Image (cartoon, rainbow, N blue to C red):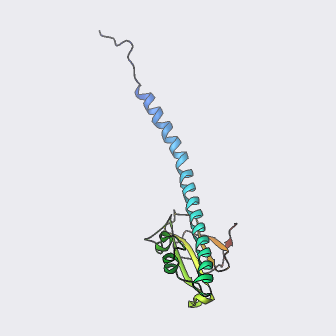
Amino acid sequence: MHKNKGQKGFSLIELLIVVAIIGIIAAIAIPNLLASRRAANEASAVSALRTVGTAQSTYASTVGFGDYGPMTDLASRGLIDSAVAAADSVSDCKSGYFFELDAKDGDWGSGYVSTGTQCTANSGSRNFISDEAGVIYAKAESSSTPLADTTGTTPIGN
């Protein structure tokens, strides 16, 4: 009979315990990671809407002669990031959101409405809307339909 004295290594039970511990840690960490990602996406969308508002003020006071301008004009003049301007549909998202900019009543002189909308339900938990007043409003939704107005929304903090 041959005995292996001093044999080194892990038993199958020890390896299974380690795998189980790693699985438990992953089950705890993944939901927190996803929640952090949603919060980061929302913060990015709010920042983009603030940038659009600042760009609109600059555009109106410099080249717009008091009128606001469309997203393409803002981007071509370097007032907003081209990635924000290009993120204008569900298929072209930036950080989980797409952005739209429309003239109020079809007239850029009367104001504008900008929206930040989730591309998917996992992008964030709120959609955003702002206008020439500069206040950004949020509405808890899981919809990829842009907000039409501020009805049912709450202003977010600065």
In the foreground, 59 or 29? 59
Disc tally is 0
Residue 67 lies in what quarter of the image? bottom right
Q: Quick check: can you spot residue 147?
A: no
> Vertical placement of 110 versus 1: above or below?
below
- Is 64 above or below relative to 37? below
Question: In which image quadrant can residue 112 be found?
Answer: bottom right
* Residue 154 x %, y %: 68, 72
Tell me, yes or no, if residue 151 can be seen here.
Answer: yes
Quadrant of the drawing holding the C terminus: bottom right
Residue 131 vs residue 1, the one in the foreground: 131
Residue furthest to the top in view is 1
Q: Residue furthest front?
A: 62
Return the x and y of residue 121 as percentages of the image width and height.
51, 65
- For the point 47% across and 68% down, the residue is 93
Please give the name of the residue rendered at 55% of the width and 83% of the height, measured from the top-left corner.
Answer: 69
Left or right relative to 137: residue 18: left
Residue at image position (61%, 83%) is: 60
Q: Quadrant of the N terminus?
A: top left
- Residue 100: percent from left, percent from top: 53, 77
The residue shown at (60%, 67%) is 46
**Image quadrant assignment for residue 79:** bottom right
Where residue 134 sits: x, y (%)? 66, 76
Query: Can you say whether 46 is above or below 17 in the image?
Result: below
